[in-house]
Amino acid sequence: MIASDALRFGPAAAARRVLAVSAGKAARGGVRRLGRGNGTAVPGKVAMAIDAGTLAGLSAQIRRGAVLVTGSNGKGTTCRMLAAIMRAGGLHPIVNHEGSNQLAGLATTLLASAGRSGQLPADPQAIGLFEVDEGSMPAIAPQISRPAAVIVTNLFRDQLDRYLEPDYVRSLLERALRRLPADTTLILNADDPRLAQLAPELPNPRLYFGIGDTGHGRDGVDPTSDFPRCQRCGGELAYSCLFYAHLGHWWCEGCGLSRPEPRVTVTKIDLLGPASSRLRVAVPGAETVLDVPVPGLYNAYNALAAVAAASECRLPGAAFSAIQQVTAGCFRMERVAVPGHDVYLALAKNANGYTEVLRAVLGNGEPRRMLLGLNDNPGKQPDISWIWDVDFDSLGGLVPAAVVSGNRAADLAVRLKYAGWLGASPATDLVTEPDPVRAFELALARTPAGEPLWVVSTSIVLWQLRDWLRKQGYVGQLWREQQGAGR
């Protein structure tokens, strides 16, 4: 590649590429040796400051191109599932497992695989698999050479201070998709009406996935829905089956636009409590049963997206079962063993995510011990108004002892009060402790020996808690764990 760079751009450009890669790799090692983080973004920033074409130049060397995964929720878990299927099918995915999903993070991922000469290994089975922040798609998509497919999981209200409304994010995605080659397959959630007409003028092939088992539909309107309108005529949508938020079997009462027929679907779902589920998945010409080691309808969608992409990559159906061996990612129902308890760490970063995690944990009606966290980030994400859209109201009486934490713990406690948790039968014994470590110790003390503790929170509480757990020896350094997982 360096030789071809010299031919195309001249010796100076080729030398700049070598310098950029070497400097980025040195920055990555330095950040980790100094204990200043996982080194998942700084190396890419250093390399691209020297050579802005670092990401494009490295991605061009991936023999089988790349699959991009974007959307509001489920990107990381979908990537983990698809990576497992790819490995079982004989491919060698290059994955940004650590969740650094913006421009510099993707460059960092490829720097880790490149030699100091700026060359990736000449691997005919290599394929890129990149989780991409939905707001960063317009910048990233044009820099990925030969994108085989783009998965869009869903679109919800998320980070209103950054993204405004979902329709704005939809416009960003359309801008990105219009810069893709015409043969890139768009893998879209048929149950999300915002995605059915995503850049409808594009000639790209489309592969839809969706849930066919209507036995898990909800009665009436989901309180977390933001009531999207028809993307073609602006009319109101109706549903024959609503799964959660605005996802379901929908049609427009104005123009008749309706849910596309999915080619990859779940025909039967068994939700097996707060740790797993069993799915009967149909792909063209075949059907398979998958035991998915993460719970909830939202993870059924993630598994479907992964299977849809695997089928598009022509991977054998026998490889789909690799999903069953996937371990939960960081804060995706991540299990941590501490003396006397299993602790589950679950990220909930918006109203839909928080609601569906709580439903997954409490959906069978069995009481659970929980630590609930809420924080803002004044410099980046100051808005927490979305907690009033979380469906706490239907879950009162299921958490006999709860601890709330984070720098906005008091706001969360007020929300739970208005949700009726304190007056439920049985009423929740609620403790407020802003410090995440002290809150964790309190929550463990209030959890009977042998019972699990569920920690559901926004990110800062979880990172502070995980750092403490690492210092106690209960979890490893995140980047080392990812290396051990075959990243």
Image (spheres, rainbow, N blue to C red):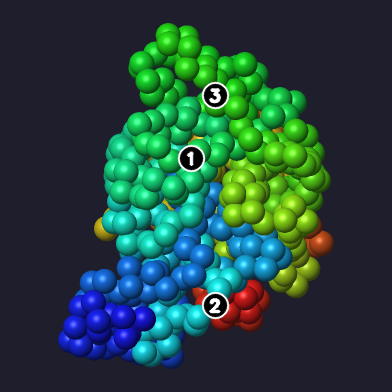
Q: Secondary structure at mark 3?
A: loop
Q: Amino acid at mark 1?
A: Pro
Question: Which residue position is annotated with label 2?
Answer: 123
Question: Which residue position is annotated with label 1?
Answer: 205
Residue 382 image point, x, y percent: 31, 49
Which mark lies nearer to you, 2 or 3? 2
Residue 91 image point, x, y percent: 62, 68
Image disc number at residue 162:
none
**Could you tell whether 61 is left or right of 329 in the image?**
left
Which label's residue is closer to the chain start, 3 or 1?
1
Question: Quarter-wise, where is residue 327 in the image?
Answer: bottom right
Question: Which residue position is annotated with label 3?
Answer: 259
Front position in the image: 277 or 466: 277
Is residue 414 in view?
no
Residue furthest out toward the top: 254
Residues at badges 2 and 3 in contact (C-beta under 8 Å)?
A: no
Which mark lies nearer to you, 3 or 1? 1
Q: Amino acid at mark 2?
A: Asp
The quadrant of the image that shows the C terminus is bottom right
Residue 475 image point, x, y percent: 62, 75
Mark 2 and mark 3: Cα distance apart in space: 40 Å
